[in-house]
Every structure is written in C-alpha cells, then in structure tokens.
Amino acid sequence: MIGEPFVLPSRGLLYGGKIPDGKVEVASMTTKEEKVLLGGRKSQFGEVLDYIFKSCTDIKMDPQELLISDRTYLLFAIRSVSYGKQFSFPWKCASCGESSTHQMQDLLGDLRVDYYETGVSEPFSTTLPSGSEIGFRMLRGSDERKLTRLVKADENSRNIGDPAYIPRLALYVVKIDGKEVDYLTAHNFILNLRVSDTSAFKSAIDKNSSGIYPMVDVSCMHCGYDQRMAVGPSEDFFRVSSVSRS
Ligand SMILES: [Zn+2]
C-alpha cells in the first residue's frame, strides 16, 4: 500500500509496540470504501470504520483495539487524503440565525492535535478531592460497542438524562484505591461519586488524553457574533458532493 505518512496522537505508546512511534500510512478511499461508508446505518458506524481503517491504512492490529482518539484522528486523515485538505461546512449563527459556510484550507493542519509524550503508560492515576485514588485507562474502539450494549441493558437509566454518561465514565475505571475493580463495582462507584469528584475525574481524563480537538472558532459575517463549532465526523463529513449540490 502506498499512502501518506501520519503520526497517531497516541504515538502508538499504548499499543505494546504494534504501531512503532504511531507512524501509519493512509491511502485514499476508493469507490468500494465510499459505498460502505455512505450506505451504513448509524448503528453500524463502528463496523464501517473498522472496514475503512483496514482498507485505507497499513495498521496491522485490530482497529477495535485502537484508542477512540486515534480512530477519530484517522477519520480526519482519511477524509483529508481522499477528498483533499480543504473542508467547508455550513453553520447557523446562534445570535441572528443567519446561515454561513465556513471554509478550512487544511482540515487536519487547522485543528489542534495533542500528542502523547514518551513515557506514557496505563493505568493513569489521579487522586480525587475526597481522597479516593482512581486508576484509569483510555477507551478503545471496542469500548464504544460495549457502551452501546451497556446502555441497552440498563432499562432504568434510559428515561432521564444521558443514559451513556455513567457507563462511559465507569469504563475508564480499572482501579479504586489500588485495588482492581470490575465494571459493576466501577459503575456503582461512579454512580455515588460526589459531583466535585466526578468533575475532578473528568479533568484527569482530559489532561491525560491525546487526540484531535475538532473545534473551530467562526465569526458571523451578518452580525459579527463569534461561536465555537464542532467539525465532523458527522453524517455529511464524507459527503463532499452534497455540499456543492445544495
Ligand atoms: Zn449572526
């Protein structure tokens, strides 16, 4: 495979040497991959991504084992290599309601990417304000699948609030006060955590994360209002033609 070189935000440091220095090659999608991508239902998005990663990169390990942050980065890289660096998206002003189109000259180059520094290893550790020490790991592609199952199984949490909120946080937790814990223990721990602890835990996760920060600041040309917008990967992320058609 001949592709363009990229470095994963994790620098491959959590993959046990399977992706040395996080160096990967990314090749353009062909119509075959585009067909799979455009035809997939939202519920199958994870599987679709696995297929695209296998077809368009030289990564040998199971894409499910990749960090979610690396998977997101790869998506941007594949988008960039396949359709070109330029990317534009429509957005609506939150102040005056007018619609605009934001143009990016270099989709990947214009976004912030946080890379891991050498020496990073799991589990990460943080001490919460209440004194509990949590050991945690970063989420993989396979955790997304697990999360969907967990949310489906938990009938009680489905009605109020974000049903994935607690399971997602619980999946990070591998140790509490030095003791290894299973998912149920972690779930109960998170469920009863004081919000000041929850907030500290979320900050610790953010602080120890690598990955692309897919946000851009846009300014309304009608009223001058500034706002921050998320950039892909959404449904129309790969549908370049649909943008020019409308
Ligand atoms: Zn405006």
Image (spheres, grey):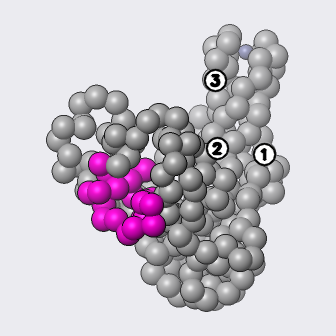
Tell me: 237 left or right of 146: right
Q: CA distance from mark 3 to mark 1?
A: 16 Å
- Quadrant containing the N terminus in the rendered view: bottom right
Q: Nearer the viewer, residue 92 or 126?
A: 126
How many numbered dots are placed on residues in this image?
A: 3
Image x and y of residue 244, in percent: 65, 41
User: Which residue corresponds to the image point at 46% horizontal and 75% vertical from the top-left?
Assistant: 65
Is 181 placed left or right of 207 in the picture? left
Mark 1 Cβ inside 8 Å of ligand 1:
no
Disc number placed over residue 231 in the picture, else none? 2
Q: Are marks 3 and 1 in contact (CB under 8 Å)?
A: no
Instruction: For mark 1, give the secondary structure.
Output: strand
Is 191 or 54 nearer to us in this picture? 191
Work out whether residue 71 can be spotted: no
Which residue appears farthest toward the front when viewing the image?
Answer: 131
Q: Residue 149 lies in what quarter of the image?
A: bottom left
Q: Earlier in the sequence, mark 3 or mark 1?
A: 3
Question: Where 113 falls versus 219 (above or below)?
Answer: below
Residue shown at 78% from the left, 45% from the top: 104
**From the viewer's perspective, is the residue at label 3 or at label 2 nearer?**
2
The x, y position of residue 135, in whole percent, is 49, 63
Vertical order, 20 against 159 (above or below): below
Residue with the mark numbered 3: 92
Report the amino acid beneath label 2: Val
Q: CA distance from mark 1 to mark 2?
A: 10 Å
Which of discs 1 and 2 lies nearer the camera? The answer is 2
SS for callout 2: loop
Instruction: Please provide the residue range marked out in magenta.
Output: 167-188
Amino acid found under the numbered disc labelled 3: Lys
Circle 1 residue: 104
